Image (cartoon, rainbow, N blue to C red):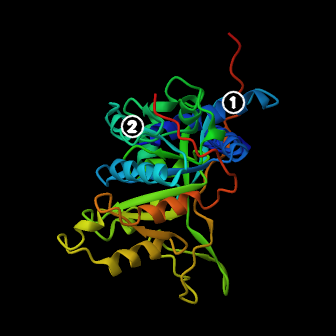
């Protein structure tokens, strides 16, 4: 259950990146993350942990959008091939076993979306 | 609505620290392996035998051992005479690079030939965290079942070496070797597989050779006693 650590890391990644934004863009409405099938992170557990990690932060009202990324191998004969799961590394095209993985380990914050309604000065 | 592109690795902080550790290991000429498995695979027993064997061969090994609580494993490992430190994670399910960095304080890595990091017993979480290691070792005991690698593909896929432990019990538990090798191969075709028994010593030398394989730096053969 390291998803809570990962969720905290998502929040701190976004919060650290925020001061660089050029102008007030209002509230963050969503954060989009890429989670590879081989990343070792369970999307459902991450969603649950995110709600806890986001509480009391600028992401408190932001929805987490998880983009699941499939395993992609680089088959010597067929090039990049997407696998349907994580337990069988045979090339779906030619059937050869291939350990050259080029996708599926992603664990990345892709982007954040703002509502562009500047906060009222109090 | 507007969108700001971030494209930042979520575990970037850990990755940066791990890269710094990797540089430090390389400079010191120490071979570092990260051992991951479920609890009860026999990591500690095998590691004790490995450290004893290295002592016989005149190579210098040390171990960092992670557990949620207690220093039982460190005390067991210290029986081998090698320098050992315990990392108590206080319920955390895996080791992170900053924990390794803080537990290396005071150790002169250039005096070591190899360092083994025994991760917290867990087949899921440790796979996401780089500790700067040169070799990731996944362990599987014959009592756990041949299909463990396909049940936990992320972890077995991330390993460079897969070690089968308790091979002396193979017959008693009707271990199907061919089916286990096929399960390992289907999630990790590039892995080196080593069959071991801490009890009989089978495979321990082979494992030591595997862990030292990248070693190009010769060290003083004098052994450091555990404090």
Q: Position of residue B29 (x, y in %)?
A: 68, 48
Residue drawn at 54 percent across, 58 percent down: B211
Q: Say few, some or many: other residues with alpha carbon within 10 Å of mark 2 (under 14 / 14 to 19 / 20 or more).
A: some
Q: Position of residue B120 (x, y in %)?
A: 40, 43
Residue that label 1 marks: A16
Res. B177 image quadrant: bottom left
Please, which chain is the residue tagged with disc 1 on? A
Q: Position of residue A18 (x, y in %)?
A: 72, 30
Q: Position of residue B81 (x, y in %)?
A: 42, 39
Q: Say few, some or many: other residues with alpha carbon within 10 Å of mark 1 (under 14 / 14 to 19 / 20 or more).
A: few
For discs 2 and 1, the disc positioned in front in the rendered view: 2
Residue that label 2 marks: B78
- The answer to whether B115 appears left or right of B73 in the picture is right
Residue drawn at 52 percent across, 75 percent down: B189
Res. A14 image quadrant: top right
Report the Cα–Cα distance between label 2 and label 1: 42 Å
Q: Nearer the viewer, residue A9 or A50?
A: A9
Assign a secondary structure to mark 2: helix
Instruction: Please tell me whether residue B225 is drawn above or below residue B18 in the rendered image.
Output: above
Specify the quadrant that holds the N terminus of chain B: top right
Instruction: Please tell me whether residue A4 is drawn above or below residue B114 in the rendered image.
Output: above
Please, which chain is the residue tagged with disc 2 on? B
Assign a secondary structure to mark 1: helix
């Amino acid at each position: 259950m390291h998803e809570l650590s990962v969720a905290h890391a998502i929040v701190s990644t976004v919060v650290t990146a925020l001061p660089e934004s050029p102008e007030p863009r209002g509230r963050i409405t969503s954060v989009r993350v890429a989670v590879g099938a081989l990343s070792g992170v369970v999307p459902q557990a991450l969603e649950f942990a995110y709600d806890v990690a986001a509480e009391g932060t600028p992401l408190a009202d932001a929805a987490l959008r998880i983009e699941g990324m499939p395993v992609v191998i680089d088959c010597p004969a067929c090039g990049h091939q997407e696998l349907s799961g994580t337990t069988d590394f045979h090339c779906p095209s030619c059937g050869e076993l291939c350990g050259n993985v080029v996708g599926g380990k992603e664990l990345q914050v892709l982007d954040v979306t703002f509502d562009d309604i500047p906060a009222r000065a109090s | 609505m507007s969108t700001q592109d971030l494209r930042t690795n979520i575990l970037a902080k850990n990755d940066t620290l791990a890269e710094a550790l990797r540089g430090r290991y390389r400079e010191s000429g120490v071979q570092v392996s990260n051992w991951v498995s479920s609890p009860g695979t026999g990591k500690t027993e095998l590691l004790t035998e490995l450290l004893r064997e290295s002592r016989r061969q005149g190579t210098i090994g040390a171990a960092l051992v992670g557990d949620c609580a207690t220093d039982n494993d460190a005390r067991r490992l210290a029986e081998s005479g090698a320098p050992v430190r315990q990392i108590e994670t206080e319920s955390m399910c895996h080791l992170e690079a900053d924990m390794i960095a803080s537990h290396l304080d005071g150790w002169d890595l250039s005096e070591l030939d190899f360092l083994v990091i025994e991760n917290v017993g867990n087949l899921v979480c440790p796979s996401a965290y780089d500790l700067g290691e040169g070799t990731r070792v996944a362990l599987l005991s014959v009592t756990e079942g041949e299909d463990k690698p396909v049940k936990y593909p992320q972890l077995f896929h991330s390993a460079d070496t897969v070690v089968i432990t308790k091979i002396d019990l193979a017959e008693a538990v009707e271990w199907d070797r061919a089916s286990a090798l096929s399960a390992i191969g289907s999630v990790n075709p590039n892995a080196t597989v080593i069959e071991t028994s801490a009890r009989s010593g089978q495979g321990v030398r082979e494992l030591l050779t595997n862990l030292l394989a990248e070693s190009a730096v010769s060290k003083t053969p004098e052994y450091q006693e555990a404090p």
